[in-house]
Image (tube, grey):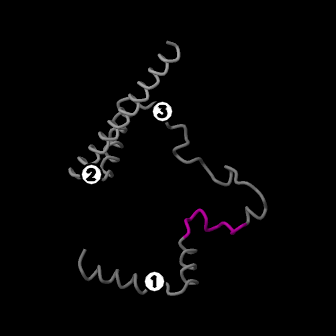
Amino acid sequence: MSEDREQERNGARDSARPSSAAARRERRGSARPAGRKGRVEGSAAAAGSTRTTESKGRPTPSRDGRQGRVSPFRKAGRFLREVVAELRKVIWPTRKALMTYTLVVLVFVSVMVAFVAGVDVLFAKGVLWLFG
């Protein structure tokens, strides 16, 4: 796109920007989806009626019953794509942070193992003392 066209578009956006709240509301109201333009606001809610499929028209494509059996290979492929997409969002720790976290976990686990072992020895001695 040329610079002249880009400047014309930016200029058109700036001049078309509403300056007051009323103008913004008017602009939002005119940008409603086509399915809502003919509807009178609050008419369904005021009448207490519920929507039926007759007023909606034909069902959306995802509910046509078009969904057949999906092969296990496609399911596995989709699963792997989603896993990779999620892993790209992860903020991975630095090497230093990873070493620190690993050390903290190892120390905590060691302390808990020592605690449980100590309690086990105490209970064993108590049982031997009590039942002889």
Q: Looking at the image, is 46 positioned above or below residue 60?
A: below
Mark 3 sits on what residue?
68
Residue 91, image x, y percentages: 30, 53
Report if residue 94 lies within the magenta region. no
Residue extending furthest toward the right: 47
Tell me the crowding category of disc 2: few under 14, some 14 to 19, or many 20 or more residues within 10 angstroms, Cα based: few
Label 2's element? loop
* C-alpha distance separating marks 3 and 2: 42 Å
Residue extending furthest toward the left: 95
In terms of depth relative to the viewer, which is nearer, 78 or 87?
87
Task: Answer with left or right where residue 119 lies relative to residue 81.
Answer: right
Q: Looking at the image, is 90 positioned above or below residue 15?
A: above
Tell me the crowding category of disc 1: few under 14, some 14 to 19, or many 20 or more residues within 10 angstroms, Cα based: few
Q: Name which residue lies at 40% across and 85% down.
A: 14
Residue 97, image x, y percentages: 25, 52
The quarter of the picture where residue 10 lies is: bottom left
Task: Answer with left or right where residue 32 lies relative to residue 75.
Answer: right
In terms of depth relative to the viewer, which is nearer, 53 or 11?
11
Tell me the crowding category of disc 3: few under 14, some 14 to 19, or many 20 or more residues within 10 angstroms, Cα based: few
Specify start and end residues of the magenta stretch as a single range: 32-42
Q: Name which residue lies at 26% across and 44% down.
A: 103
The label nearer to you, 1 versus 3, is 1
The quarter of the picture where residue 27 lies is: bottom right
First in sequence: mark 1 vs mark 3:
1
Query: Residue type at mark 2?
Result: Pro
Mark 2 sits on what residue?
93
Quarter of the rendering occupied by the N terminus: bottom left
First in sequence: mark 3 vs mark 2:
3
Mark 1 sits on what residue?
17
Label 1's element? loop
